[in-house]
Image (cartoon, rainbow, N blue to C red):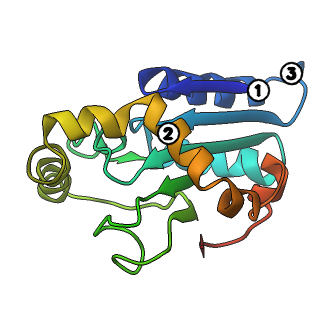
Amino acid sequence: MVTGHSLGGALASLFAVSAACHDDVPKPVRCITHAQPLVGDVRLLESVRKLEGSGDLLLLRTRVGEDGVPAVPAFSPKPRFVYAHIGMELKMYDIDDDDAPGGRSKKNVKLSRSEKKMKTFALNFKALIKLFVIKAGKKNQRRAHSLREHYRRLEKYEEEIRSLGEKLEDVYSKTGSVIL
């Protein structure tokens, strides 16, 4: 099991991908990260999907809905390089979060697979401004990004999360996008 938070989460996911590519490492390599920023491009996403498909890698990213760090870096100096998330994402919202699925409803947890989303610089920049400046503010962003807040929400929504499965393999067996 490989874990990490924030930059440590990014490094943990890259290490897990690398480990899954080696024959002498027991499979599947399991990785759970919290508040991980973007780490690669579509080519990495495609490679990770192959490793997931073969059962060699199980990668779950958790994030808090108000946290802007998983949206960075917003762009690359290389014109054709577009960042993409890898693995499965477990996004946790507070009930009063406007960005929660269905708005201000009781849907607190959303599980989804990473997609090949090509965002332009303008869309990423707009999302960053919304998350860091307008919506969250510096104090709220710091709280939303903290590992303490991730653990608080994991505990708060434990029943909903457990309904996805007891083990990472169970969560991975969910196909498509599941909204609770």
Q: Residues within 10 Å of mark 2 (few under 14, many from 20)?
A: many
Query: Looking at the rendering, which quadrant does residue 17 occupy?
Result: top right
Q: Residue at x 68, y 34 (%)?
A: 31
The percent coordinates of residue 139 (x first, y second) are: 18, 34
Along the line of sight, which residue is nearer the eye, 49 or 31? 31
Q: Nearer the viewer, mark 1 or mark 2?
A: 2
Q: Is residue 115 above or below residue 62?
A: below
Q: Residue at x 38, y 62 (%)?
A: 117
Q: Residues within 10 Å of mark 3 (few under 14, many from 20)?
A: few
Along the line of sight, which residue is nearer the eye, 13 or 77? 13
The percent coordinates of residue 103 (x first, y second) are: 34, 77
The answer to whether any part of residue 53 appears in the image is yes
Q: Which residue is mark 3?
A: 25
Q: How many marks?
A: 3
Q: Is residue 62 above or below residue 93?
A: above
Q: Nearer the viewer, mark 3 or mark 1?
A: 1
Q: Which residue is mark 1?
A: 1
| Type of amino acid at the residue the image marks with label 3 | Val
Q: CA distance from mark 2 to mark 3?
A: 29 Å
Is disc 3 placed on a helix, strand or loop? loop
Q: Which residue is mark 2?
A: 150
Confirm or deny contact between disc 3 and disc 1 (CB under 8 A). no
Q: Is residue 148 left or right of residue 31?
A: left
